[in-house]
Image: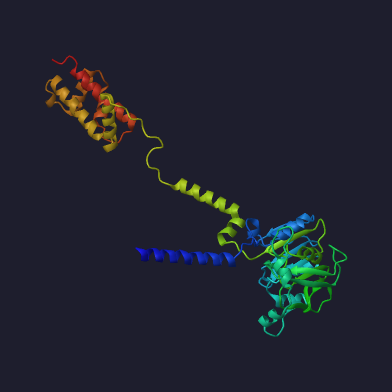
Amino acid sequence: MKRQWIIIAALLVAVGLIVSWVARNTYWEEVTLPGFPTGEALRNPFYAAQNLAEELGVETQWRRALGELPGEDSVLMLKYWSWDLIEARRKELEAWVENGGRLIIDGTVGGVDAIERWSGMRVEYPEEDEDEYDEEYEYDEEYDDEDTDPVTQIPTSFGRCGDFNLSAGDSLSDPARATYRLCGLSSVGWINGTRAIEWEIENRDGAQIARVGIGRGKLILINGFPFSTDWMLQADNGAAFVDSALLRRGDLIVFVSDDDHASLLELIWLYGAPALLLAAAFIALALWRNSARFGPLEAPAQSARRSLAEQIRGTGRFMQRLDDGRALHAAMVRALHEAARLRIANYAMLDSQARLTAIAKIAGLDAGELAQTVNFNGKRNHTEFRSAIALLDTARARLNVNHP
């Protein structure tokens, strides 16, 4: 028993030492982490750029497909775009820029060889190993780790940032500006080409954002993607966006992102919904028109009990449908002859014409009509059949009147 108490005491002392060491060597500190995009910001890669432009009085549109090009004095920004995928579309874009459009292309746009053949501009990369070059590139780590955006409270360490010089052209947002603090530009490569650059932001390696004139329009080439939603609110990215695109109040800027393609069914519905609805209506009408009916539209009323007259009429209708009523007609003729045999003397010795004449005389009927009714064995309609049966029954009943 004493040994158990010793073990328990030792365990308590060990736990106490551990808790004391943790308390002495740890501390609590609040750290602000960048939040994840939600809602429209999650779906739209231009969400921040759109809101910034609209606050400046610029009309914006966001499309999943290029569709119809905007006016020639508008701005078009492409993202996740394949420049040389469709030749007709490429030529249409090139003509739009040459006629006065302003086109923004970032590092997510493919087909750089086709872009260089048209514009004379491209992004060049160093010959040495890119990993080694990336390690040598100078970033302001203190700025990245400590500074926070005053509006969104997102640390600028969310992306690498650095200082860049305005080496050509002027700033619309601040005419006195000579440098930009930018995040989201590529850490390797630079923009080079054969055209004269009219507006340029550069670092020690060369131009990172450049605007050149092509015809009456402008091409803004970016080495990176600083104008995406993840980066637009960082440092001076918004000012560089306005300055590079020459945005002014009343402009129209169209954002096109080709990264999320609609399925075949979605495209069919998007471009052919009226035709689909008409086809569905036609198919439904054809199926309804040619479908088989299972019985009458309304069920006949069921009576609790049937009268004798209803039973007789029902039996007569059945016999008429079965063999055009020949069996019922033959039965009525036999009944007529049985009644006449009991009423007319020597009936069996008479021929058929004399029998019918005698019956017609006693019954007070026309002999010719009676003979035609008795001897006719063809097909009758409902009215003729009913009249024949009624005549035979009348003759039989009159033979039985006052019968001894």
Image position of 363 with respect to 233: above or below: above
Residue in the picture at 41% in, 64% down:
8
Q: Quadrant of the C terminus?
A: top left
Residue in the picture at 66% in, 58% down:
41
Q: Where on the picture, by quarter, is residue 74? A: bottom right
Q: Is residue 272 left or right of residue 112?
A: left
Percent across and percent down for residue 163 are: 78, 72
Percent across and percent down for residue 3 are: 36, 66
Residue situated in front as seen by the camera: 216 or 24: 24
Image position of 246 with respect to 374: above or below: below
Question: Residue furthest toward the bottom?
Answer: 128
Q: Quadrant of the N terminus?
A: bottom left
Residue situated in front as seen by the camera: 317 or 95: 95
Numbered marks: total: 0
Q: Is residue 275 left or right of residue 164?
A: left
Residue 368: in sight, yes or no?
Answer: no
Q: Is residue 328 left or right of residue 146?
A: left
Q: Where on the picture, by quarter, is residue 371? A: top left
Percent across and percent down for residue 188 are: 71, 78
Residue in the picture at 78% in, 60% down:
71
Percent across and percent down for residue 171 are: 85, 66
Residue situated in front as seen by the camera: 284 or 368: 284
Residue 203: in sight, yes or no?
Answer: yes
